[in-house]
Image (cartoon, rainbow, N blue to C red):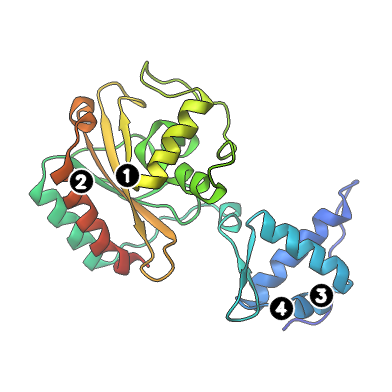
Amino acid sequence: MSPPREPAALPGRQPRAVRNAFAVLEEVIAIGPGATAKEISHAIGLPSATTYRLLNLLVAEEYLVRLPGLGGFALGRRAARLCVPVTPRLPTAARAVLDHLREVIRWGVHLADLTTGRIVLTDPDPDHPPSEEALLARHPHASALGKLLLAEDTGAAGDDTDGPALPEPRRFTRHTITDRAGLTAELKEVSAGQLARSCGELRPDRGCLAVPVRHPATGALVAGLALSGPPARVAQPNRELIAVLREHADRLAPLLA
């Protein structure tokens, strides 16, 4: 554990509370998962009451999570968004699963890492190039992979809320859902069914189906497995195709956890 220290001074009129919150985050990173409030308070030289208030705020905002088993704190999912996303290295076994899926269907097959709360394409189909990653990340409401991410927030929020906080949804085609009520309703369906569709919403000539890949032990959203094809085909029930997609997502789960 690092020795007590004063948080570094910031120029201008930056509020001390913001500086202290970043100091708490830095100390959780330095100590590692399971960092206790007492350890953090001692390390950064803050009163215990102030440290607890900051910890509670950071947990509420999902920058930290409590670890019941260890009795301390660890970084939450929003903390990962403070870093520039790096494309994870795909295990050979996971690549074999994707290759098999591409052999048995004629649609484009794409895998995206979703652990940072942002779409990071880890294995886009070279024969069916997806939309640009930056476009998918900035406008998640218009893609199936993006809807998986947004639906995760909707499902966590519960049915009595208005859904996740979204920027003004941009219209790309006449099929793009831009009204918040309609989008929230669709995200709740995605959360309930664990299946997302985008039928010509980002590009009029392309549709997409996506299912989540979840950590087998915690259920946390790890990745999204997507199939791209003609919008009219995506809009069909596709029960057998979806079953194959889910089967391969289940095979990927222990390889990506």
Mark sitting earlier along the chain (4/3)? 4
Residue 135 visible, this orientation: no
Mark sitting earlier along the chain (3/1)? 3
Mark 3: which secondary structure?
helix
Relative to 105, is 251 on the left or the right?
right
> Which residue is farthest top?
174
Question: CB of mark 4 within 8 Å of CB of mark 3?
Answer: no
Which corner quadrant of the image does residue 248 belong to? bottom left
Q: How far apart are labels 1 and 4 at the CA level?
A: 38 Å
Which corner quadrant of the image does residue 79 belong to? bottom right
Q: How far apart are labels 3 and 1 at the CA level?
A: 44 Å
Residue name at image x 45 percent, y 44 percent:
151
**Type of amino acid at the residue the image marks with label 1:** Leu
**Type of amino acid at the residue the image marks with label 3:** Ser
**Type of amino acid at the residue the image marks with label 4:** Thr
> Which residue position is annotated with label 2?
242
Mark sitting earlier along the chain (1/4)? 4
Mark 4: which secondary structure?
loop
Question: CB of mark 1 within 8 Å of CB of mark 4?
Answer: no
Residue name at image x 41 percent, y 30 percent:
142
Residue name at image x 59 percent, y 54 percent:
78
Mark sitting earlier along the chain (3/2)? 3
Single out the mark in the foreground, 3 or 2.
2
Q: Position of residue 43 (x, y in %)?
A: 80, 77
- Could you classify mark 2 by the number of other residues whose Cα lies within 10 Å: few (under 14), some (14-19), or many (20 or more)? some
Q: How far apart are labels 1 and 2 at the CA level?
A: 9 Å
> Which residue is farthest front?
160
Mark 2: which secondary structure?
helix
Relative to 96, is 139 on the left or the right?
right
Q: Position of residue 130 (x, y in %)?
A: 29, 37
> Which residue position is annotated with label 4?
36
